[in-house]
Image (spheres, helix red, strand yellow):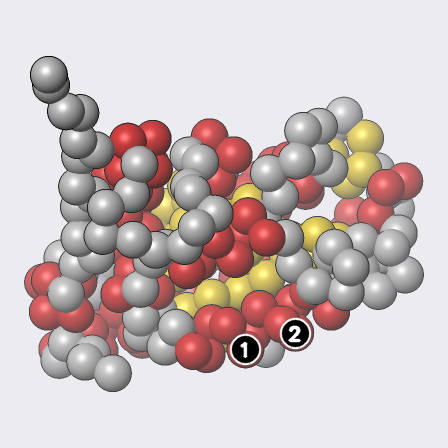
Amino acid sequence: MSVATSPSPSPSPSPSAVAASAPSPSAPLRLAVIMGSVREERFGAGVTRWFTGVAGRRAGLETEVIDPAALPLELTGPSERPGEATARSLAALRPRLADADAFVVVTPEYNHSYPAGLKNLLDWHSAEWRAKAAGFVSYGGVSGGLRAVEHLRQVFAELHAVTVRDTVSFHNAWGRFDGDGLAGPEGAGAEAAAEKLLDQLAWWGETLREARRRRPYTG
């Protein structure tokens, strides 16, 4: 009788390994944009496209979208022996998160907080977040998803990440986007807010990248 075993996932990189992989100061800043919702027909896909469109026009910035819906992880939490599907997802996710210099999370607000799938993604990783900058784009009803952002700030602090002050938030977002992106006259104001967020993220991202290159962050 044969016994099938699940492949072991690639371990999270050590702080020294993360520092060793840091590019030179002149290299483009690598920004990972993480979609917070994994629901079918999620509204956040359009918000993500809009934000990456704004970010893509900036010089010195490389943007990659990370979609947790395409890389499912077990809800039982981090484990040294995950199932086969989770091990495959981790093998794909960990290098991409480790290579990123900064993160932007695009999140809705569910019941005054952020989605469970997003928390699961955060919890399955550790060193990948450390000593890096993070920002937020939120959407929702009257609150614009800001209650989700305030909870996420606490989580990222625990993960040793640095969150930037300004947030892009869309209040009553459902009528503000169409198939081409942000609809109506509010687009200019939203783009200005996104540029301010990216300015702060670039400063912190480049500063922390140089710091990691000079001295590994051990926490």
What kind of residue is marked 1?
A: Gln
Side of 68 where 205 appears, left or right: left
Give whichever of 5, 187 is nearer the camera. Answer: 5
- Asked where in the image residue 86 lies, by quadrant, the reply is top left
Side of 105 where 92 appears, left or right: left
Residue drawn at 41 percent across, 54 percent down: 77
Tell me the SS state at disc 2: helix
Q: Position of residue 167 (x, y in %)?
A: 65, 67
Q: Is residue 80 above or below residue 163?
A: above
Residue drawn at 47 percent across, 47 percent down: 75
Disc 2 marks which residue? Answer: 150
Disc 1 marks which residue? Answer: 154
Side of 87 where 167 appears, left or right: right
Residue drawn at 65 percent across, 59 percent down: 114
> Badge 1, how many Cα within 10 Å: few under 14, some, many 20+?
few
Side of 131 where 17 appears, left or right: left
Let me know if residue 169 appears in the view: no
Residue drawn at 53 percent across, 65 percent down: 135
Image quadrant containing the C terminus:
bottom left
Q: Is residue 177 above or below residue 60?
A: above
What kind of residue is marked 2?
A: Glu
Q: Position of residue 8 (x, y in %)?
A: 17, 41
**In the rendering, which numbered label is found on residue 80?**
none
Q: Is residue 219 above or below residue 131?
A: below
CB-based contact (under 8 Å), mark 2 and mark 1: yes
Let me know if residue 176 appears in the view: yes
Compute the Cα span from label 2 to label 1: 7 Å
Q: Residue furthest top?
A: 1
Tell me the SS state at disc 1: helix
Q: Position of residue 53 (x, y in %)?
A: 57, 39
